[in-house]
Amino acid sequence: MRALSVVTMTAVCLAFAGLLGLAVWHIAGSPAPVNLPGLLAENLDASGVEHPITAVLLNFRSYDTLLEIGVLVIAGIAGISMAKTTSLEDPDLRTSDSLLYALQRWFVPLMLVLAGYLLWAGSDRPGGAFQAGAVLAASGVMMRLGGIPMDFLRPGVLLRLGLALGFTVFLLVAVASALAGEAFLAYPAGFAKPLILVIETVLTFSIAMVLLALFVSAPVNRAQEPEEGEHE
Amino acid sequence: MTIHLLYAFAGVALCGIGLFGFIRLDHLLRKLMAFNLMGSGVFLVMVGLAQRGGQPDPVPQALVLTGIVVAVAATALAVVLIRRYYHLSGQITLAEPGREPVKKPAADAHREGPTE
Amino acid sequence: MTLWLMAGLLFTPLAWAVLTLLVDFRMGRAVTWLGILVQVLVSLGLWAAVASDGGFYYLLGGWQAPLGIELRVDGLAVTFVLLTALVAAACGWHASVYLDPGKSWHRYFWPLFWFLWAGLNVVWLGGDLFNLYVGLELISLAAVGLVALGGQAAALRAAIRYLMAALLGSLAYLLGVALIYGQFGTLSLADVTALLSDGTVAAGQTFPLVLMLFGLALKTALFPMHGWLPPAHGIAKSPVSALLSALVVKASFYIAARLWLDLGGHLGGYELAQLIGVLGGLAVIWGSWLAFRQTKLKQVVAYSSVAQIGYLFLLFPLTWGVTDAISLQAQQGITLQVISHALAKAAMFLAAGNLIMSVGSNRVDALAGVSRFLPFSLFSFGLAGVSLMGLPPTGGFAAKWLLLQASLASGQWWWLGVLLAGGLLSAAYVFRVYQASFIDNTDTDHFFHPPKSLEVIPLILALLSLGLGLVAEPVLSVMALPFEGSSR
């Protein structure tokens, strides 16, 4: 019975991969009727940044990015909603590795600089808010493992402000541009570059906060809620 | 046929392997990793298929970046849920427990009905 | 004016999500009431604007598709925006009384609630395939967070199962989007449709459409992929269950329906349409039967959702290869079914929550004797049930009547059996709950009385669902051409 189910699943997955490969093969045979990269190159000058990917992320399809940060904030909220309310200190998470302590003094400043560089590079070469935020969060994880106390990560108003900051600034820019007479998220002419820079900077910070909060909030809250109408 | 299509077909293979893992494995963390494998496959198909002309297309690259952030958020949420679930039930699969778990005394008052 | 309304519609839920994140539960409740007021007014304004001037495309960031993202603001979209505003307002109001402010994790209910609302609006208005994916993920993650909020092991198991199904569904959808982008070079649904209609792309691939429909059907809990729905909807807090059953599953269906109506004619086929229809029909019968068999009250309601969702999938066979008139009739029937089920199911879950709160048990047989004490909630439950059964003059009746006519006119008489059996079976499970509540039980006469406001909310929703049948004509006329909208 078990063997039969494995065979069936293998067959299903092979069929799926085969059909998918066939579709890819057919689609690859003919050129796409819409030349989006060309259209993008024509409008790149109006976007305020030189790098096409950053232009797509923060100007042409900025609505996607706004919502994407929203998704990240949701994950952060759900994460901290399960954290202990009193303390985030979990002795299990702290290592006592002397090598880590020694390396940390070198790596943390280096990683902070790297994060700053990635953020700055985003406007004209690969890089940007998410990469910088990920590096920033990684250095936070390292500091955390090395036992550096990070009180701002307790579920308090500071943590929630940190989670919300990037999203809030982005959202305020969006609605301000709508109130200024343009559409939602349409940056006023001439302001695109500074606005994108501001958004990228706060996003870096917020993305790092969310990722770090999710790492740190893994300790578990013992209090629990019974199902409706279920007696304890 | 260009070298870029190779990426797309690698993505196809990853999708197949990921799907198999996702439906076959019971261990929740493995299931989650299979999901991420499949996600990587989808991203590879997206990027590889779009630059078959040899020219890099920035739009799917940006989409994939967005997709990665979404996948990271979903994975993180899943890990937090799985960890808490494991802590509360001692289980790491979704199988229903054979018998009712022993009820611990309540830590807080029961609001939604009389407690007798 | 409409531009301001659009900005308000997009801004309010996201802004309120942030505001309520920063304050505690009680403050969040007060802030939410204000936000609900704003959002309902904005939705009403937008609905009125579209009803008088017709639909339009809203260019986000001022960029046209395919470079930018366009929102399609047509009659159907604003009708669903308004429906969402009504149902979410009711659920938010109910939750503000129902949830215990003393529990620290309940403060996170409000931001998740607002994010969920924002995601729903994204989906109703979305015209960009990838943007719809992000909207779906926004909804799924917020919904999973709400199911898991402060939960025990069983709630977490349900939430994880829900999350896994939702993730697989999203990924299948995204893979379809990747293939569509590879083939057409654009992500705008309107552009893809135009390219197919004017013959620029002669033969599209069916596989991407199948992938997307599979993913969306999984997220909508179409039989036999419905396994995740009853645990999640049954174990969540009642206002959350109401939101999930009334609105969240409709979001993925809405995308599937729009894909089908735009692309199905070119990429779909008779077999695919019939297969989806048969699965829908099986969902109606199997879901209703399981609803009848459940011992827990909220599981009855949750399985009833599986059944009612099944009706929606009759859209696929009834709009493929038929005349425009029949297709329109089917689309109108499905639209009415979505609206009436949203109202009735929200009413039912909220009433079920009140009943559970009152008897202190979630079992159906624990309701014995409750009919003497809680006529209001029981009455709302019954009224909602009448709409689900499809008795006149409810919205459910109007919907099923249109579907019946469309089935006959298109010669697909076999769907009649589904419509009939579904109605009878739903009558059976609603009466079973009623029967349990009318058993006279003398030794339990100390019921907890929920606050009056909790009882009023489901009653209002149930009455709306009941009245929908009477105003079906004006409601349908606003979405004059459902799923079509203004030309670009």
Image: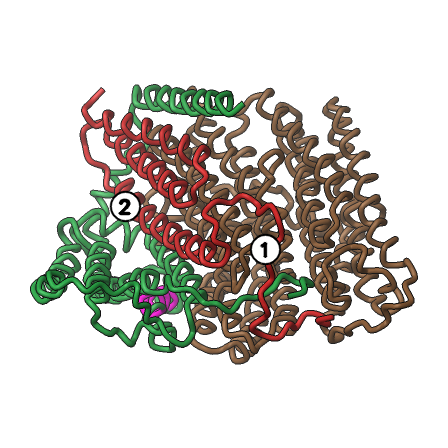
Left or right, C259 with respect to C129, comes to right
Residue range corresponding to the magenta coloring = A164-175
Total count of labels = 2
Please give the name of the residue rendered at 39% of the width and 67% of the height, measured from the top-left corner. Answer: A175
Please give the name of the residue rendered at 62% of the width and 56% of the height, measured from the top-left corner. Answer: C235
Numbered disc 1: what chain? B
Q: Nearer the viewer, residue C146 or A32?
A: C146
Which chain has been coloured green in this picture? A
> Is A174 contained in the magenta span?
yes
Q: Nearer the viewer, residue C115 or A17?
A: A17
Numbered disc 2: what chain? B
Q: Colour of chain B?
A: red
- Residue B101 is tagged as 1
Residue C341 position (above or below residue C268): below
**Residue C450: horizontal and vertical position, in percent?**
74, 73
Q: Nearer the viewer, residue B115 or C277?
A: B115
Q: Colour of chain C?
A: brown
Please give the name of the residue rendered at 38% of the width and 20% of the height, measured from the top-left corner. Answer: A18
- Residue B62 is tagged as 2
Query: Which amino acid, mark 1?
Result: Pro
For numbered disc 2, what is the local secondary structure? helix
Left or right, C383 with respect to C438, comes to left
For numbered disc 1, what is the local secondary structure? loop
**Residue C158: horizontal and vertical position, in percent?**
55, 50
- The first of marks 1 and 2 along the sequence is 2
